[in-house]
Image (cartoon, rainbow, N blue to C red):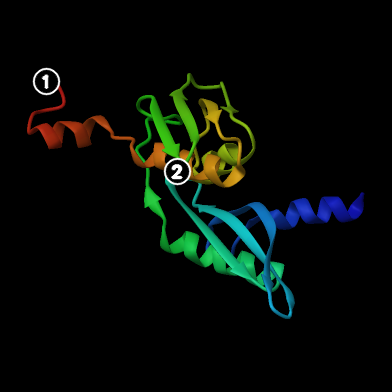
Amino acid sequence: MVERDNRRKDRNREESDGLISKTICINRVTKVVKGGRNMRFSALVVVGDGAGKVGLGMGKAREVQAAIEKASQLAKRNMFEIAMKDTTIPHHAIGKFGRGQVILLPAEAGTGVIAGGPVRAVLEAAGVKDIRTKSIGSNNRINCAKAAIEGLRSLRSADQIAKLRGVGIED
């Protein structure tokens, strides 16, 4: 039991630079070659500042720790700013990746994060406090996480939309 608790603490850790790093999944990958099998590990990590910036990265290495490190470095490089309205998102969005779809719906303050597994990890790292989600299609962790990232990427604030249209926010 103690070992399981230590693993949970290790998977969700806060780094020295103030970023929240969450390991979504670790897969063992095998490549069959002439001399036998090559075993490697693939890790999917989400990194966020808890205030509207989030990134996702995937790394592969011979050891688990090295794969996690590669994935977190890639996630830090892929970080982007999301549009937020207080503690939720400004409008509904649909993220698609592969056969997976994630529907993101804004919620009132106090609702909390209603999401499962990988989508929850992405939203918590991003700093979204109140949101409702629904995952449709593939329930593969990688597809769900990438679909959630695509949904967050498609969000636009009222300021951004007004600027694109060349009108004021009131219009």
Residue holding disc 1: 171
x then y, percent, for residue 91: 35, 25
Residue at image position (90%, 53%) is: 2
Above or below for 159 versus 70: above
Q: Secondary structure at mark 1?
A: loop
| Classed neighbour count for the residue bearing mark 2: other residues with Cα under 10 Å, few (<14), some (14–19), many (≥20) | many
Q: Quadrant of the C terminus?
A: top left
Above or below for 131 versus 11: above
Residue at image position (56%, 69%) is: 70
Left or right, 118 with reference to 9? left
Above or below for 160 versus 76: above
In the foreground, 110 or 64:
64
x then y, percent, for residue 46: 54, 52
In the foreground, 142 or 157:
142
N-terminal of the pair, mark 1 or mark 2, is 2
Residue at image position (41%, 36%) is: 151
Above or below for 52 versus 15: above
Left or right, 141 with reference to 80? right
Left or right, 116 with reference to 100? right
**Cα–Cα gap, marks 1 and 2:** 30 Å
x then y, percent, for residue 145: 53, 43
In the foreground, 67 or 163:
67
Residue holding disc 2: 149
Residue at image position (53%, 57%) is: 19
